[in-house]
Image: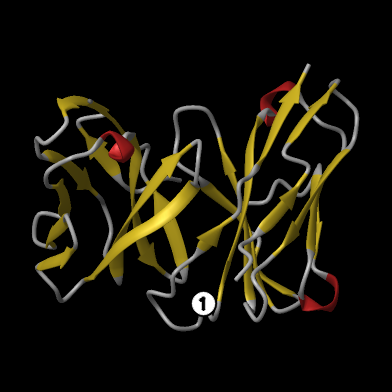
Amino acid sequence: SQQGEEDPQALSIQEGENATMNCSYKTSINNLQWYRQNSGRGLVHLILIRSNEREKHSGRLRVTLDTSKKSSSLLITASRAADTASYFCATEGNNRLAFGKGNQVVVIP
Amino acid sequence: EAGVVQSPRYKIIEKKQPVAFWCNPISGHNTLYWYRQNLGQGPELLIRYENEEAVDDSQLPKDRFSAERLKGVDSTLKIQPAELGDSAVYLCASSLDQQRAGETQYFGPGTRLLVL
């Protein structure tokens, strides 16, 4: 069964704006990961945040994790048309990665 | 470095027919995964291999699905017979060593299956 639930499920923004998406999960985790999927490059790992971390940055990406609320957020700053994709959060526990349903993000040039 | 290779990329079959998907992981990756992704959903794990051993196949529908990873490298996933509900994208992924938490999984382009 899938663990993560992303919110909003669809997001449309102008190029240059920031995009924020959230993920909630249900059980304890070792870490939480975000993936991007588009038709050009398939499913690609973006960033991982461990259960004892609260915030992590990678380029234009910022991820937060609140284990007390069992939630995470992904912020993409200064979005580009190439950021158009589906974004999935995935929780890792018991040697298994459980994906959410995904956020569809469209960046309008 | 070559990524995860899958074939075929697309497959259309009639229900009750058999179908097989092939995956070649990244060289040196011990762990191999098969996922199924239904339309509008995230991938769901079907089976995980550590070298040639299937260590997590609890979500594999064993009545019609089978998989093998001979010699601990390439893997084949088979469906026999296929049902309409099997239409999905089948993704293969590999990682260096799943024993270590947080190991990055690298995904192939997937095989899009349509069962008519």
Residue closest to the far front: A109
Q: Is residue B28 above or below residue B17?
A: below
Residue labelled with disc 1: B98
Residue closest to the far right: B17
Residue found 63% across the figure and 44% down from its top: B110
Q: Nearer the viewer, residue A109 or B63?
A: A109
Residue B82 placement, left or right of A37: right
Residue B83 placement, left or right of B104: right
Snapshot quadrant of residue A17: top left
Residue B59 position, x and y percent, is 61, 52
User: Element under label 1?
Assistant: loop
Residue found 72% across the figure and 24% down from its top: B114
Residue A99 position, x and y percent, is 40, 49
Mark 1: amino acid = Gln
Local packing at callout 1 (Cα closer than 10 Å; few below 14, some 14-19, many 20+) is many
Q: Nearer the viewer, residue A96 or B2?
A: B2
Residue B94 placement, left or right of A20: right
**Numbered disc 1: what chain?**
B
- How many marks the image carries: the answer is 1
Residue found 45% across the figure and 28% down from its top: B40
Residue A94 placement, left or right of B63: left
